[in-house]
Amino acid sequence: MKRSEINQALKELEAMCKKYHCFLPEFCSFTPEEWKTKGHDYDEIRDCMLGWDITDYGLGDFNKVGFSLITIRNGNQLHPEQYPKSYAEKLLYLRESQYSPMHFHWNKMEDIINRGGGNVLIKVYQSLPDEEIDYERDVTVHMDGHAITVPAGAQVKLCPGDSITITPYLYHDFTVEPGGGAVLLGEVSRCNDDDTDNRFNPPVGRFPAIEEDEAPYRLLCNEYPSAAE
């Protein structure tokens, strides 16, 4: 992705948060220059990969496949003694044209909440013992305390305010219902590790290669400099 594309996407997410009164912690406003001055008192942000994030799944077509997000809080599964939080929280932004590919998590359970904007459509499948997609069995999901059973591959619609619980090994993707505009999603989950806990089907990448065509507006969560001494 070009840095200019990333900058534009992050600004859109920032504006969406302001529109729907999702106020962000101070570290989300740090400039790249400010990050160079931050010491070890900000190590939790670095080590737990808090902050701005973006993905095009390595496919190079962000406006069709990808989304922008902010990780607000998280633990660290590799260093639980230092960062013992067992939970995480994110905000995700999808343009009306964007799609997030089919995947499940081995360990993470998450609630996906529509915080504002249009409607999001989440297609769901159970998984087979070999971790492939089960195209036959019905799927039972919980939406705000209401259990519903839908056919394999059904799209569950979340209107603003609605949420769904995604359990481990439940395949799911995200699209935005045409005509309603972009969507701001919340995610409340168990501790998150994007390096080890995403099973995409078919396989895709996670973090984009970046073409530096302009200066970064915000650093991404995998770009922080080492702590200033």
Image (cartoon, grey):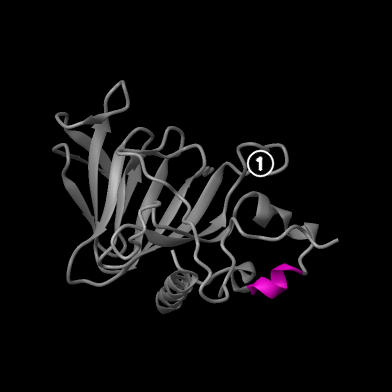
Is residue 143 in view?
no
Quick one: label 1, few (<14), some, or many (20+) residues within 10 Å? few
Front residue of this view, candidates 41 and 56: 56
Image-based side of 111 in relation to 127, left or right: right
Q: Residue at x 43, y 54 (%)?
A: 187
Tell me: residue 103, above or below residue 175. above
Q: Which residue is mark 1?
A: 84
Q: Residue at x 41, y 37 (%)?
A: 105
Tell me: residue 193, above or below residue 72. above
Q: How many marks?
A: 1
The magenta segment is 30-36
Residue 102, horizontal then vertical, whole percent: 29, 44
Instruction: Say whether residue 130 is magenta.
Output: no
Instruction: Say whether residue 33 is magenta.
Output: yes
Q: Residue at x 70, y 60 (%)?
A: 225
Residue 114, horizontal then vertical, whole percent: 33, 61
- In what quadrant of the picture does the N terminus appear? bottom left
Image-based side of 170 in relation to 81, left or right: left
